[in-house]
Amino acid sequence: MRPSKFRVAICGGGVGGLTFAVALSGYPDIAVDIYEAANTFTEMGAGIGMWPRTRKIMRSLGLEDGVKKLGKCTEFGQSAPVFHYRKSDQPEGFDFFDLSTPGGLTMLHRAAFHQFLLDRLTHTQVTTHTSKRLTSYTQPSPSPSPITLSFQDGTTATCDVLIGADGYRSAIRAGMVQEMFDAGVDLGCLEGEGVEKLKEPMWSGTVAWRAMVPFQKLEKVLPRHRAMCEPTQYLGKNGFIIMYPVTQQGEKLLNFVAFRMKHDLEGTPYHGPWVAKNQSREDFERDFEGWETEVQDLIKCVEKPLLWSIHVARPLPSFAHKRVAIMGDAAHAMLPHQGSGAGQAIDDAYTLAKLLGHPLTTVSTLPTALAAYDSVRRPFAMDIMSRSREAGRLFTFYHPELDCSVGGDEMDHRKKLEEMSERLVRNWKWAWESEIDGDVKKALGMFEAKVGKGSVRNGVNGTNGYSC
Ligand SMILES: Cc1cc2nc3c(=O)[nH]c(=O)nc-3n(C[C@H](O)[C@H](O)[C@H](O)COP(=O)(O)OP(=O)(O)OC[C@H]3O[C@@H](n4cnc5c(N)ncnc54)[C@H](O)[C@@H]3O)c2cc1C
């Protein structure tokens, strides 16, 4: 085995952390440790949508064939139906829009995708550790000294670069914010309480009811229900429902997420458990009282839904500080209304791996590589965060000129819905029209300009050790 040029610690083995580890496996001279807090690497049983931008990254990592086995993939460029839209917050709802996009949306079972990534971690330089909840780290100043990681079980470990992929309640984010504050970085907030707030996510004013319903059950109770034929979004004032089929180990399931929004409570504290399991269906039904029968019938099929308060990340002046960086939800937890949080974590993973794998990246140039990651990824991810927020507002008619709950007849409502659909597409088309390669090239260019150009072995489309 070749000696490694440096040791990367990835804190968190979710979709972001695992994709990053898989991407780093293409560089045999980088040693990787993944530290996961849970006693096993798992994901919840729910759906996850993957847009063409993300699917192209999967292809670059040699993972596309596997993704194709987990969910339907339309050829890039070929138009495919994505969601059917109905106005549903009334006794008789109506159809108003069909979203079709080039490449469509690949719908996966989250746990199956997570397991697929885990199975790709076969390289000897990647070591996984479970039951390792990181509580803090120390990053000494002279660059070559290792970073020390401390875990809840009292043990410690070291690394040369630390990447926080530890989700929306990230311990690394908290440590990094404190480090930046202590170093005099302008955090754009007041001292004390403001700094503490930056470490924590913020309630978005939204809660989500989540459930998976087996098709077998639906076929018996609601044999001709639309949900089994076409992925649908049911929209209404201050709430909407999204549903689409996913497959796990051959079993077809309906992924069901119903959002309730109190937009004006955004930024206020959420009172109650952030994730509440085994909730009563009656409370769920009450939240959608008065909605069309098609919706009520489906809610009746749900058993023990999960109630999830949706928290988002507060903006930071940087996703990196010296040899520590954050990625995925730790950096930019966002509202899920463009189905893009995991996709953005995968963007981070791919960009970071390209930078760390660069031949000029060494222990002493690591801070420059992470700064290039921050310069390119932070503006993009923050833009997607605000687009996701806007999507939620459009879906729930939270614009005075699009509010279908005030005045007018069905004709007026249809006009507003048409305008809403146009805005929706304009706001969302980055997901099927943009590609990451230009951004990666930009990040590598910034890095090379800072450290001096050498022999480059991993241009965006160059050979890098991956299978394709
Ligand atoms: C209702 C809903 C629907 C969504 N739908 C989509 C979708 O269709 N498409 C999409 O792209 N995104 C979607 N998302 C967003 C997506 O789920 C997240 O953005 C994504 O899971 C983030 O991945 P991550 O790896 O950054 O974090 P996580 O998935 O949260 O993983 C973090 C990992 O870190 C571990 N961890 C936490 N703290 C520590 C610690 N201190 N030490 C060690 N380990 C730790 C955790 O146990 C976990 O394994 C949705 C989100 C929601 C809420």
Image (spheres, helix red, strand yellow):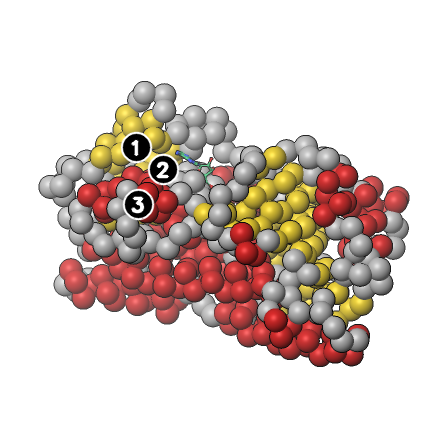
Between the residue at mark 3 and the residue at mark 2, the CA separation in whole angstroms equals: 14 Å
Q: Position of residue 323 (x, y in %)?
A: 23, 46
**Label 1 sits on what residue type?**
Ser
- For label 1, the residue is 136
The reply to whether the residue tagged 2 has its Cβ within 8 angstroms of ligand 1 is yes
**Label 2 sits on what residue type?**
Ala
Front residue of 293 and 12: 293
> At x 45% / y 68%, what residue is drawn?
435
Secondary structure category for the residue under label 2: helix
> At x 53% / y 70%, what residue is drawn?
427
Which is in the foreground here, disc 1 or disc 3?
3
Q: Earlier in the sequence, mark 1 or mark 3?
A: 1
- For label 3, the residue is 195
307 relative to 374, above or below: above
Q: Residue furthest top?
A: 154
How packed is label 1: few (under 14 Cα within 10 Å), some, or many (20 or more)? Answer: some
365 relative to 217, above or below: below
Quadrant where the N terminus is found in the figure: top left
Q: Are marks 1 and 2 in contact (CB under 8 Å)?
A: yes
The reply to whether the residue tagged 1 has its Cβ within 8 angstroms of ligand 1 is no
- For label 2, the residue is 171
Front residue of 72 and 285: 285
How packed is label 3: few (under 14 Cα within 10 Å), some, or many (20 or more)? Answer: some
